[in-house]
Amino acid sequence: MLRVAGPLAEVSDDAVTREVRLAPRLPGGPPVAGDRVRIDSSGSQGIVRGILPRRTVLERIGSGGRVRAVVANADLLIVVAAVAEPPLVPRLIDRYAVAAMAGGLDLAVVLTKADLPHDRDEVARVVVRQRAVGHPVLIGSSLDPALVDEVRRLIDGRLAALAGLSGVGKSTLATALTGVPRATGPVSERLRSGRHTTTDPRLIPLPGGGAIIDTAGVRSFWLPPMGPADIAMGFPDIADAAVHCRFTDCRHMGDAGCAVAAAVEPERLASYRALVEAAEEASRFARGHD
Ligand SMILES: Nc1nc2c(ncn2[C@@H]2O[C@H](COP(=O)(O)OP(=O)(O)OP(=O)(O)O)[C@@H](O)[C@H]2O)c(=O)[nH]1
Ligand SMILES: [Mg+2]
Ligand SMILES: [Zn+2]
């Protein structure tokens, strides 16, 4: 599934791309970019009759508060973040890492706009911290073919979803990687409108193998209900330190005998705690408490 637009969708089977129609009330539907689907080709136009089970998924809250898939079956989530314009938000990368872990994807970070003036110490801390927990980190300018080549090697034939704040350069990278133009636009206009330039997630094959999905307009991914232990799985540094906590059900929220606070970086602990608090709030909300 390359993209979905209302009742129509574009599908590809490696050789050909064609437009098909979605069956009404498709179970588990609508399908999303990356989905593998069953197509009934008996009529003049193919009809999507089924969605095959998803290996991985990234979701968001759609209209009416319903959880909807945005990207299916991607192997890798590439968080694109600018070192400046818009400013780097380290905590956002940690949140994406938890969404990737929950959805079954690997995570990598691409830092763009290194050609602009930025706080080198802060950026270096983010690079070191993310690499330390096993996430590949690339840094450069999306306008520089050298970074584009590195991203291509990072993807290495896989299906990668690109996500990040508006204006960080996702579409610029996507265009450079695929040769297929994606709408890009100056940051200032977007800040005024508060809207993303790109609005339809679309799977685009890369020449030489692999593919990307530019997750347009998705501010953040939905996280399933998770306890502290689940969230800690998205923080390998915290999970490692947690083996030394006095209690096995330690939440690392200031619990007695907690070994985590002394072992991990304060910014990482703050990221983790913000996610635990958000998850607790979400579950209170779901249970109908105030
Ligand atoms: N200086 C510099 N500008 C960049 C870089 N990458 C992207 N830009 C510019 O930043 C602006 C935003 O880039 P886009 O690729 O449209 O950003 P996006 O992430 O796709 O944004 P949305 O579609 O709104 O989510 C464009 O004017 C790009 O030319 C970079 O590495 N350095
Ligand atoms: Mg874009
Ligand atoms: Zn602890």
Image: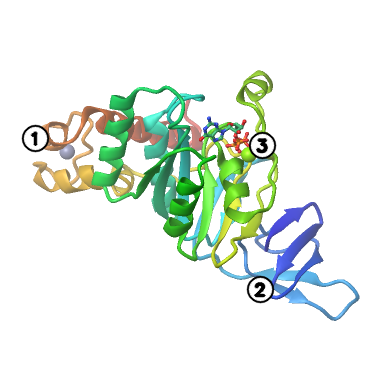
Question: Is label 1 in contact with label 3 (beta carbons under 8 Å)?
Answer: no
Q: Report which quarter residue 279 is drawn in.
A: top left
Q: Which sits in the foreground, 3 or 114?
A: 114
Mark 2 lies on a secondary structure that is loop
Give the residue pinned by disc 3: 184
Q: Amino acid at mark 2?
A: Asp
Q: Earlier in the sequence, mark 2 or mark 3?
A: 2
Residue 246 on image: x %, y %:
8, 41
How far apart are labels 1 and 3 at the CA level? 51 Å
Question: Is label 2 in contact with label 3 (beta carbons under 8 Å)?
Answer: no
Q: Residue at x 82, y 56 (%)?
A: 7
Looking at mark 3, is its residue's CB closer than 8 Å to ligand 1? yes
Q: Mark 2 against mark 1, which lies toward the viewer? A: 2
Mark 1 lies on a secondary structure that is loop
Taking the image as shown, residue 220 lies to the left or right of residue 182, namely left
Q: Residue at x 63, y 42 (%)?
A: 216
Q: Mark 1 against mark 3, which lies toward the viewer? A: 3
Q: Which sits in the foreground, 64 or 133?
A: 133
Q: Amino acid at mark 3?
A: Thr
Give the residue pinned by disc 2: 14
